[in-house]
Amino acid sequence: MDLGPKLVQQQTQKLIMTPELRQAITVLQLSATELSEYLTEQVLTNPVLEVRDEAATPASQSQEDGGPREAEREGEKFDLDWQSYFQDRSDLGFTPTAERDPDAGARPVESRLSEAPTLEQHLDLQLHLSQLTPAERRIGEYFIGMLDEDGYLRTSLGEAAEVLGAPVADVARVHQVFTIFDPPGVGARDLAECLRLQLEALPPDKARAAVRDLARRIIDGHLEELGSGRLAKLAATLDAPAKLVQQAADFIRTLDPRPGRRFADPNDIRYIVPDVVIERVEGDYVVIVNDSAVPRLGINRYYRHLLDRGTGAADGEQLGEARAYIEGRLNSALWLIRAIEQRRRTLYRVTETIVRLQRDFLDHGLRHLRPMSLRHIAEIIGMHESTVSRATSNKYVQTPQGTFELKYFFTSGVAAAGETAGISSESVKMHIQDLVAGEDPSRPLSDDALTKLLGKKGIAISRRTVAKYRNEMGVPSSSRRRRL
């Protein structure tokens, strides 16, 4: 047996991840907003590309006939008829923004987004409007800096006095002023103080005196019983009527335990731009890929003219090098345009298939959402499952039932009587929510009772799964939902 080194020639098939393929995959999984940013970067790096002005009239631009040209890049050859491409004025699936919304440019200035103030800015303004000395204002500024995102003061008055080198009495006096700032409850050191400050800030007509007094007693020493829902025990402890305890508990729940949250990350507001729109037209549903947020790409006229120029005897070599560079950039631009169009077609086919499978959902709402998998969609449209996954990643669809993430439709399901495809987990949650909304408040439904009621509707589900779905929806347990 020959165990020495030797050369063997062998043929194998494998997928080569070319730069063009990587770009196509990248473009496919980008949302409309991300694609807009990506194309802006591509325009900056490729001088042949330019953003097309929608108001321009490219059809009026004259073109000269020419034969096919061949561009070579990285060992691959593509027969590209550039003149045919230049003469093709079609923008598949694109409707100019002005046609979709004639009033888009005539909206009032008030409808545009302005920067909201932070909690620190909001409090700082009130601090400087207060009748405080410079030394007291310095204490107030220290309090603002020591607030957490919920609006609680995360330091004691003694520590603040030690850090600032001020008398504790002065620090306490400034804190007393600080706690009457808006929002009510800000600057509190614990939950009880936060709720108490809000209770004091409310006008007298918000609740009758008996309810307010009992609410204060609960806040001062019985928040744990209130949080656990033990209202009957609370009524016995306070020696108060059960109905009055229930009213006081409901009143306390109207207060905000996190007053600073409304100012949290005001500049990190993320608006959803739907990548696809499903509209109902004369009893049927039409799928529209949203291209309004994506810049329209075109080929720079200057480089097109350079490509059409002939080569002279003196400068033929120089023009030849320029021609090769331009053709390479044109080739890259064409790959990008193809990738954008492929993304649009894939997104359209996936959404169109979802419309066919989820017709009951579009007609009647979430309770009729059916379970669906990526593999099922991939088999229908003849694509790989990973392609469908990338096409639906980070994308939203606007439907007559609301705006959803495309991944929302790919949910697991449970068995349902008379249903060949079963029922989705989101539909089960809606049924649970309906049952809880219609229950007797004095005798709320337990998880076991919910399981039996769902079984009567033909939904086979375990008690543990009911508890899981209930927790995911933020619905408290039956003991915490009980009302006196």
Image (spheres, helix red, strand yellow):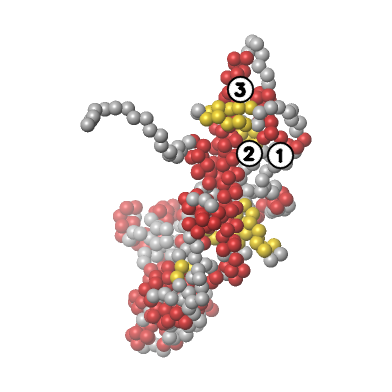
* Quadrant (top left, top right, bottom left, bottom right) of the N terminus: top left
* Residue linked to disc 1: 89
* Residue 160 position by quadrant: bottom left
Which label was assigned to residue 297?
2
Which is more toward the observer, 135 or 156?
156
Left or right of 446? Residue 409 is: right
Residue type marked 3: Arg
| Residue 127 at least partly seen | no
Q: Which is more N-terminal, label 1 or label 2?
A: 1
* Residue at left offset 37%, top offset 85%: 232
* Residue 10 position by quadrant: top left
Residue type marked 2: Leu
Left or right of 173? Residue 80 is: right
- CA gap between label 2 and label 1 equals 12 Å
Which label was assigned to residue 323?
3
Instruction: Report crowding for label 1: few under 14, some 14 to 19, many 20 or more residues within 10 A (C-alpha).
Output: few
* Residue at left offset 49%, top offset 36%: 19
